Amino acid sequence: MKRRIHFLGILCILGVLGLVSSCSKKAAVVERPAFSSDSAYVYIERQMAFGPRVPNSAAHTQCAVWLIEQLRAFGAEVELQKGFMPDYRGANQQIYNIIGHFGTAETFTRARILLGAHYDTRPWCDEEAEYENRFYNVPGANDGASGVGVLLEVARQLGQRLADSTLYTPVDIIFFDCEDMGTPQFYTGAEREDTWCLGSQLWAMQYARNKLSMYQYGVILDMVGAPDAFFPKEMYSSHYAQNYQEKIWRSAAQLGYGALFSEQQSYPITDDHYYVNYLAGVPCVDIIHYDVRNATGFASWWHTRNDDMSNISKTTLQAVGEVIMSQL
């Protein structure tokens, strides 16, 4: 049997020998940022109550209006970015990106932090085993609503900081549209490039042209609510924004979420962060659930009718929310 000596015990021994000035009987306590997973969970339920938020549907429009109202209620200056992008068939798809600007006159000239998630849901359950089930809409509890739910709670906390005059770094929260409009599995026509993440492509191209604001970096949340969530270091994030990725993962470890935010590297994933990096030139990190047990790289419920509230864990929401809030 090998005896283990606790690190704090070593410090105390060194203190007795006069090699360190003092010792403590308690380990350092990490101050946890304010965040309510109960609140985030309710925001996810509210999105689900609209039904699938498929672009050009009534549920999508109702959800967009609600998101704008929520951001304004939290004190944000809200911008609606509208435009068109070609979908997988080459048809123009209407885009509505919702941008909430949090800041004061004093912080206006400072570089901002970008936080994003997509609020649309996939029109097709094209990962269903049975062909006839592939034409249902994805409910989108995790794939879409979870990231939005976390960011709405972040927005609520930022609103409190604005009210308390303790918001020192300006933040933009962007709810991207048409992320999940990529080419369906059953499509047999000519394959187009860049059919995913249409909203972030539109935003990134306009930002690259205008650059009305400057960003330190960005973080995208996608599928961040599962009970068995696993967030490895996504490869595009490592390539374009490694310093910020390392910073976020260190914060996760300090908060006790090192098992959730793994040091394992994942394959590159085409998500909104890719276009924020590649087109806009803003270093951006993707926090996204990755599942090595499945051939797709994603969970078994991904792009199926099973993407419902059973895939949402308040424990996971709390972890992700605290990690994000620790960066602000």
Image: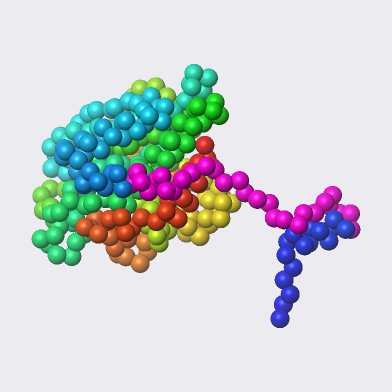
State whether residue 153 appears in this view. yes
Q: Where residue 24 sits in the image (x, y, percent)? A: 77, 54
The relative height of residue 68 versus residue 231 in the rendered view (above or below) is above
Coloring applied to the structure: rainbow
The percent coordinates of residue 286 (x first, y second) are: 41, 46
Q: Nearer the viewer, residue 292 or 100?
A: 100
80 vs 273, nearest the viewer = 80
Instruction: Please say whether residue 19 is one of the residues in the magenta stretch.
Output: yes
Badge count = 0
Quick check: is 131 in the magenta stretch?
A: no
Q: Quadrant of residue 55?
A: top left
Q: Nearer the viewer, residue 124 or 25?
A: 25
Determine the main secondary structure of the stretch shown in magenta. loop
Q: Outermost residue, bottom direction?
A: 1
Residue projecting furthest to the top: 105
Q: What residue span does the magenta drawing correspond to?
A: 17-44
Asked whether, in this view, residue 271 is left or right of residue 20, the answer is left
- Residue depicted at x 23% and y 51%: 139
| Residue 240 visible somewhere in the drawing | no
Residue sitting at 22 percent across and 58 percent down? 304
Establish if 136 lies above or below 217.
below
- The residue depicted at 50 percent of the width and 46 percent of the height is 322
Image position of 261 (left or right of 179): right
Residue found 22% across the figure and 33% down from its top: 95
Percent of width and height locating residue 181 = 21, 45
Quadrant (top left/top right/bottom left/bottom right) for the N terminus = bottom right
Identify whether 28 is placed above or below 94: below
Q: Is residue 149 left or right of residue 54?
A: right
Residue 194 lies, in percent from the top left, at 25, 42
